[in-house]
Image (cartoon, rainbow, N blue to C red):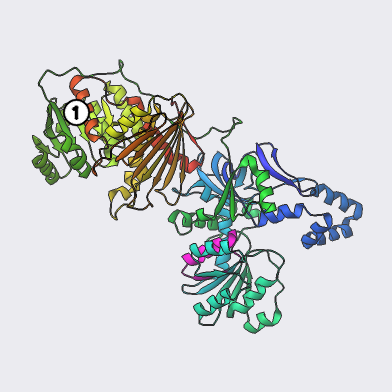
Amino acid sequence: MKQVVQNYKSGELTVLDVPVPGCKPGGVLVRTAYSLISTGTELMKVSEAGMSMLGKARSRPDQVAKVMQSVATNGLPATYSKVMGKLDSYTPLGYSLCGVVEQVGSGIDDVKVGDLVACAGNEHALHAELNWVPKNLYSRVPDGVAPRHAAFGTVGSIALQGVRQGEPQLGEVALVIGLGLIGQLVVQLLAASGVRVVGADPDPARCELAERLGAESCGDPASAAVEAAVAELTDGHGVDQVYLAAGGGSNQPVELAARLARDRGRVVDIGKCRLDLPWNAYYEKELDVRFSRSYGPGRYDPSYELEGRDYPIGYVRWTERRNLACFLGLLSRGSVDVEPLVSHVADFDDAVETYRRLKDGDLKAVAVLFRYPEGDTGEAAAPAVAVPAVKRTGGAVSTPARAAGKPVRLAFVGAGNYATSMLLPHLAGRDGVELSTVVTTTALSAANARRKFGFAEATTDLDAVLDDKSVDAVFVVTRHSSHAELTRRALLAGKAVFVEKPLALTEDELAGVLAAVEESGNDRLQVGFNRRFAPLLQEARQRFGARTGPASLRYLVNAGRLQHGSWYLRQGTEGSRFAGEGGHFIDTASWLLGADPVSVYAVATSGADDLQVVLRYPDGSTATISYVTTGAPGFPKEMLDLVADGKVLRLDDFVRASVHGGKRWVSSRLPKARDKGQNAELAAFVRAVRTGGPMPVPLESLVATTAATLAVPAGLAAGVPVTLAGAR
């Protein structure tokens, strides 16, 4: 495996091939997804390594004292040999990461293989592809927390421990000096605790960031702005706490702390700055100076960190591990947001260059992450979601053509807003169609649908409809969590099925549907992916013509915010918004590109519902779906661009389309009521049922689109592309 190491004597940084660590008892072997560069601690170590021997000695007087003690004890030759041997060795870097448990050691029962964990420790959470991590230095990542965010767990714990040492109270005012990575986290933690925060840092960009993240006012410590803000917020009394999160050799932070703290205020040292305390200032105010030791109680205690001996919670409420779990919980609840702190994400293979850029100042950053590649050593399989094979007993089943003049009898299960506004108006009164029965869970809604659309019967008895031999096709238009089971039952009953998206919310549900196809031999299924049937998009595709090379497709979906109380928000039972409607956009992309995707990469942006989904296709084509809920409500919902072979196809929200290439074509502008293809899709489905011909979309494509949609949460959790196993 590969690991970032440094030679402290020469200053050399390299990515070295090293053996895979063994999985010892009392810990887990973790394959890293993201690791975080501490732009304070690690860069200080990197800079020190580049110094002369005299410079190293000056920067680490504590180590010089140890050397002198060794000389007195062991003599100069032995000490020199020992020191030079240690200096001329590769040492690890890193102490904060997130990864997937690959192997579980004996004595561990709180996590299993495949779990996502955040890890801590400058000996265990290293910049390496694999790390062995003891029990008290990892914590399981809550559902919904992205791996890149969970990689902040250790530095988050450091900030959290510092805030605990300050003992903040609701309504107090605090000053944070130094707005680097730790300082920014301290600002957020204090704000989440009900404390009003003033920040001090000479970097205007960091001051602006801290204000966005919860600080009331920030400024250069050398200016009068910070002192003025403190005076205004405290009526001139001074702040209750000062948090020293700065580094460097200046004594300015401790002097500023003394000047702006109130009488008997608390000063907490979190960073590593000069601490020449001005005696008179600290004495006259009787300031309480405290130190925060890294991640919390347990740090530097081998019995805790290496042997897994926990401290009783009744005596030590917050340990290293409990702080780590607490910070991850704050992330999951949205109390802390680390995404704005991410200045740069670098591939792990570019580690050396990234450190160089940081050291030289070419890369200005608060936080930098290493993103690790998919395993290529055979030691671990890359994340994959299987595209289930479609099996049919005796091959594909087609229903016989119907007798001339005999209508297709349709039953509806569900009569909610979408069914009554987008589907039934296109079916009611259609030649050759008879609306047989509507089934709902409440009698009134069934009765309303019967009255409005002319169903022959209304009922709440689903079994009666499935047992009715005269019903040719069943429409499943219920809430998402019931789609797969209702589809499965209708297929087993021998019905053709039109199910609104999504077909399934889990891989098990999808497998259940396909098991019903195999058992019954009935593959008469259509999912409501209507956009490929939109006349405007159909014409644009025809004008664009055939492709000879790979294409790039970009699809912006300005989904907008949901109203409070919408059942779409019940993600625990109904799945995420993207799980509910993402298949629409994946299907459209796949239809335009003429293939099914082979991999999916997903990244969450400003919120759990805001996603960037990148699909890769067999011929090298890619489709990027930007699914956002935070856009302007007046902006069009869907914008699509397809680029290939010197041509561009553009779709503007199903209102206008254009093709640019050898000949330019621009459609006329459609009326405000956009045609997204529901009418044409329903006509194709009814025709297939009536004639016994193929379904409008092959079952294999429906399955591939559903599998790709289901791969999105897996990709978010893993932080790497997810291979659609079995995709063609």
Give 423 or 667, whichever is nearer the viewer: 667
Q: Is residue 699 magenta?
A: no
Looking at the rendering, the stretch of residues picked out in magenta corresponds to 178-199
How many callouts does the rendering have?
1
Question: Quick one: quadrant of the N terminus?
Answer: top right
Question: Is the residue 716 above or below the residue 473 in the image?
Answer: below
Question: Is the residue 117 above or below the residue 621 in the image?
Answer: below
> Does residue 529 appear in this view?
no
- Left/right placement of residue 233 relative to residue 258 reads left
Q: Position of residue 241 (x, y in %)?
A: 56, 73
Give 725 or 228, whichever is nearer the viewer: 228
- Left/right placement of residue 719 relative to residue 72 reads left
**Residue, x 38% and y 29% (percent of image)?**
663
In which quarter of the view is residue 492 placed?
Answer: top left
Q: Which residue is mark 1?
A: 473
Q: Position of residue 244 (x, y in %)?
A: 62, 68
Residue type at numbered disc 1: Ala
